Every structure is written in structure tokens, then in C-alpha cells.
Amino acid sequence: MPALLLSACVSFANPEPSVTVPPPSTTTTVPMTTTSIPATTTTILPVGSPVGLMTTTGVPVALRLVTPERYLVHSPCGNLAFVEDGEPIYPTSVILDPGHGGERDIGAVGRNGLPEKVANLRVALETQRALTEKGIASMLTRTADYATTLTTRARLADTLQADLMVSIHHNAPTPGPSNLPGIEIFIQSDSAESRRLGGVLWNHALVALNQFDIAWTAAEDSGVMTVVNPRGTDAYGIIRTPETPTALIELGYMSNPVEAELFATEEYVEVAGQALADAIEAYLTTDAPGSGYVEEGRVFRPNPGLSRADCVDPDLG
């Protein structure tokens, strides 16, 4: 058994938010010597054992199996890989999902050159910092600029037995002008807890961002809503796939030049991160019902997320 399993729950420091996001990790060919075990197999681990691993290269992964010499993990691209060392991760209350990542999944890009994947990660890191100050354990689905599939993100939240997951995004294309921030929050259609999480996030984010006096843009139906595809199921994979109560927040429009300039500032990152942390704390510690609900929701067919075939795994050490 790896020596790390003998220790109690390990808390490890996460990097402070910075305007410079680390470059993509060096890619590697993931060893797949256990191809007889499908990557979709349900994880079964002994009670009290870690459920995830922070690799020595700083990549959080869900554990599949522990052997006497090494760990079998689900890589960010959904492959099975052996890893020899890392910090064990135990059940974690909050999962923060910085949307997009890697060379093929950039997200929206502002006129100022700011990619959405970078803005999402900056806000997620600041949210994690604020949660840590509150004594709330959290984990990111990605910690740098590398690719990870929607299925892997959902698996990490479920494997870590999280109370909630918040997927952080910045929107496009630009709708009409608005006096208020055009925040949109997408929730799971079959989950009352996802609905409440979305409403609490809406309350805190709207008040916090409205302090910025800029020319906001917003859709006419902006608010907290379900988005289903023509078949009637949740349209977005990060909403549809996890069992964990999940909400996806679009904090504004990267495609609006004025908003993109704001998103590039440290002040915005601090305000947005603190607002999300305050909302998560309120969701976990109170019965606040939230608000901003749009009852009819939308019917929409989004573009598919990053495929496993197009995903390049980072170095797992």
C-alpha cells in the first residue's frame, strides 16, 4: 500500500490566483496497461480510503484502484493511468469547475485577447482561496491550462462525494444592452438542490457585479433556468452528467468589449470570486431559497463538448 494512505486526511495548499495562468503542462502518452478495465467502470474503494489524488504535477484525478505500488486513476481525458505518487484527496465539499481548457477548448475570446478559459480559471482560483478562508474544503476540476472532458469533470465531483459543483463560465455572443449584469445560471431540471444552488448564486453574483458601472449586456430572459435539448433532457453535459447538485454560471459576456476589459482586472476577479464563495457558504449553511428563477427555461442544442479523441492528457508525473 502506498505510504500516503497511512496518513489522515491531507490538506494541501493551492496556488494563489494570478493574472498569469500557467502554460499547458507537457503532454504525455498515458500508460494503458490495464485496458481490460473500462474507464467507465464504477470506482470501488475501501471505506476510509482516499477517493482522489493530487498528482505531483498538480493535476487532480479520481481514483479507480489502489495497488501496493501505485494508484490507478482516471486521467483528465478519461483514460486509465497508473500514477506512483501524489497527495491523497478525501471526500470534498465543493467542486469548482473552470470551464474549457487546453489548446482545443478555449471558449469565447474577448476583443482584448482574453480567452474565456483563462478568465474562468482565475475566478475559480479566487473562489477557492475565499472558501479556504471560510474553512470550506474545495477542489478544482482543472488547476492549469490543460484539457479535460465533461465526463471526467462530472466523475471527479461524484467520486469526491461533493455537496455541490459550480461550473464557471463567461458568455458569448453579445445580446442587447442592459442596466444589470447579464448573469445566466443553468440548473439541473430534476434537482431541487441544483435549483436552490442556482438561485443563491444569482443573488450574490448579481449584487456583487452590479457595483461595476459599465455598459452591461443581457439576454431578455437572463436568470436561473433549465436548458433542455429537443429530446427534453438537460442540454449541457456538465449539468446532465453528474449526480452531484450542479449549477453552471455565466458571469457576463466575454464578447462584449467593455465586459472583457473588466474581466481582465484583478478587482473583478476578487469581487467575483468572493461573491461565489459567499453564495456557496450561504447554500451550505442556510436554507436560503435564492431568486432570479425563469420558470419556462430554454430549449437549445449546444455544440458538443471536447471529445475524448481530441483531448490530450497533461503530465501526471
Image: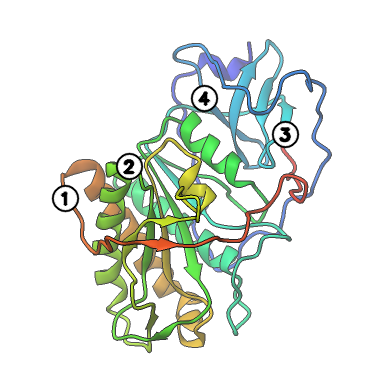
Instruction: Classify mark 2: residues with Cα within 10 Å, few (<14), some (14-19) or many (20+).
Output: some
Question: Amino acid type of disc 2?
Answer: Ser
Question: Amino acid type of disc 3?
Answer: Asn
Label 4 secondary element: loop
In which quarter of the view is residue 211 placed? bottom left
For marks 4 and 2, give the CA distance: 24 Å
Q: Up-down: is 20 above or below 211?
A: above
Question: Amino acid type of disc 1?
Answer: Ala
Specify which label sits upstream in the sequence, 3 or 1: 3
Instruction: Classify mark 1: residues with Cα within 10 Å, few (<14), some (14-19) or many (20+).
Output: some
Q: Which residue is mark 2?
A: 191
Closer to us: mark 3 or mark 2?
2
Instruction: Classify mark 4: residues with Cα within 10 Å, few (<14), some (14-19) or many (20+).
Output: many
Q: Which mark is residue 79?
A: 3
Closer to us: mark 4 or mark 3?
3
Specify which label sits upstream in the sequence, 4 or 3: 4
Q: Which residue is mark 1?
A: 288
Instruction: Classify mark 3: residues with Cα within 10 Å, few (<14), some (14-19) or many (20+).
Output: some
